[in-house]
Image (cartoon, rainbow, N blue to C red):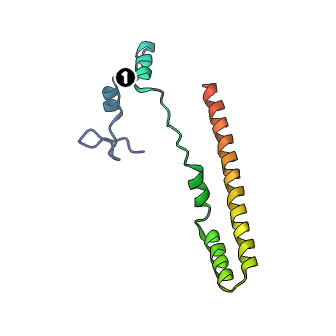
Amino acid sequence: MPTSAASDGRDLRGAPLEEEVLRALRVDATTGLSAAEAAERLRQHGPNEIAERRPHPAREFLKKFWGLSAWMLELIIGMSWALGRYADSVIVSALLVVNAVVSLVQERRASGWSGGAHRRVAAWR
């Protein structure tokens, strides 16, 4: 990590120097914020966290039909239908939909578990 400063008060990566950041935030690096100042900034700006955005479930479900494996199965469905093999087409369609549903359920469970773990870690702070 480069520590030498460029002539414009920035480090070699173009980021502001630590002193500039501390001055802009009105913070003393040795003592930090007072409890009153921290409470005021919390009231004014809210907690220091990233809002979690979850995509719509329908969009997530439809994304399961976009990709190489799904495209191959969709091609098989189309070719089976064109050749008059309707039963094969229906079976492959059912497999494609079941795969999408199972995948979506597993991802939702995994994200729910990671969200719970995130909340438990946040509670320890």
Amino acid type, mark 1: Val
In this rendered view, identify the residue nearer to me: 71 or 79. 79
* Residue 30 in view in this figure: no
In this rendered view, identify the residue nearer to me: 87 or 103. 87
Q: Is residue 15 above or below residue 32?
A: below
Left or right side of 102 for 119: left
Residue extending furthest top? 36
Residue lying at 45% horizontally and 14% vertically, measured from the top left = 35
Residue 52 on image: x %, y %: 53, 40
Q: Is residue 11 above or below residue 82?
A: above
Q: Quadrant of the N terminus?
A: top left
Residue 3 on image: x %, y %: 37, 41
Q: Is residue 63 above or below residue 6?
A: below
Residue 96 on image: x %, y %: 69, 66
* Residue 38 in view in this figure: yes
Left or right side of 46 for 76: right
Q: Quadrant of the C terminus?
A: top right
Residue extending furthest bottom? 83
Residue 117 on image: x %, y %: 67, 36
Residue extending furthest left? 7
Residue lying at 40% horizontally and 16% vertically, measured from the top left = 37
Q: Which residue is mark 1?
A: 27
Mark 1: give few (<14), some (14-19) or many (20+) Cα within 10 Å.
some
Q: Is residue 24 above or below residue 98?
A: above
Q: Give the image quarter of residue 34.
A: top left
